[in-house]
Amino acid sequence: MEVTTVNEDLGRALLERVMSIPNGHKIKACQQCGACSASCPSSYAMEYSPREIIAALRAGVLNRVFESSTVWLCASCYLCTVRCPAGIPFTDVMYELKAMGIEKGLYKKDQHNIKMARTFTRTVEKYGRNAEVEMILKYYLTTNPLKLLGQTSLALKLLMKGRLDLFPHRIKGLAELKKMVAAVEGGSNGS
């Protein structure tokens, strides 16, 4: 049986922040019709569907939002947003929930989805794009080094087909990209 945790003050603050994003106020109009969940290509792997996350957020049931991996499994395909009769920007809400959870330390410290996201972000910041080999090495070395050994046959196959770059190259204009990212981060609600 799931233990329900309600923190009214924090729940209200998070709800207000989500409602402050463009069209975020529309989550109050959610009819719980399930169009978002039915449209979501990742919902089969989620502990809670997008519909359930919105209901939990509105009710202040934060453990359902932040202890699950649901927001990290969002594929950012925008199907939920397009098909929502209330016009709720689900994908943007999921991004905001990720940011808020990290800022306020609400996620489980050992949640691998967060470690993967951070590793990916650091790699992109360094090169301006994903450097798969470096990212996977850093991720597995910090989470499960032995699992890295199980990936060697796949890595060799990808390497032989020219699909794996052992020596990543930085993009041209990396400094400009960093300036753009800094400008966007400086203008977000959380910074």
Image (cartoon, grey):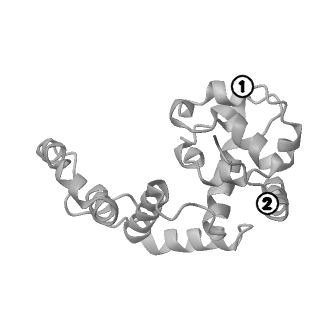
Residue type, label 2: Asn
Is residue 82 at all visible to an observer of this figure? yes
Q: Residue at x 55, y 74 (%)?
A: 179
Instruction: State which mark lies toward you, 1 or 2.
Output: 2
The residue that label 2 is drawn on is 7
Of the numbered discs in the image, which one, if any, rests on residue 96?
A: none
At label 1, counting other C-alpha atoms closer than 10 Å, the crowd grade (few under 14, some 14-19, many 20 or more) is some
Q: Position of residue 152 (x, y in %)?
A: 15, 49
Residues under numbered marks 1 and 2 in contact, where contact means CB atoms less than 8 Å apart: no
Task: Name which residue type carries label 1.
Answer: Ala
Looking at the image, the residue that sits furthest to the front is 1
Q: Quadrant of the C terminus?
A: bottom right
The image quarter containing residue 115 is bottom left
Q: Position of residue 80 (x, y in %)?
A: 67, 33
Residue 175 or 6: which is nearer the viewer? 6
Q: Quadrant of residue 15?
A: bottom right
> Relative to 71, is 148 on the left or the right?
left
Compared across the picture, whether 29 is left or right of 114 comes to right
Q: Which mark is residue 35?
A: 1
Residue 58: x, y in percent?
A: 82, 47
Q: Earlier in the sequence, mark 1 or mark 2?
A: 2
Residue 89 visible from this viewpoint: no
Q: Secondary structure at mark 2?
A: loop
Distance from the alpha carbon under mark 1 to that under mark 2: 28 Å
Q: Is residue 154 left or right of residue 186?
A: left
Residue 29, image x, y percentages: 88, 37
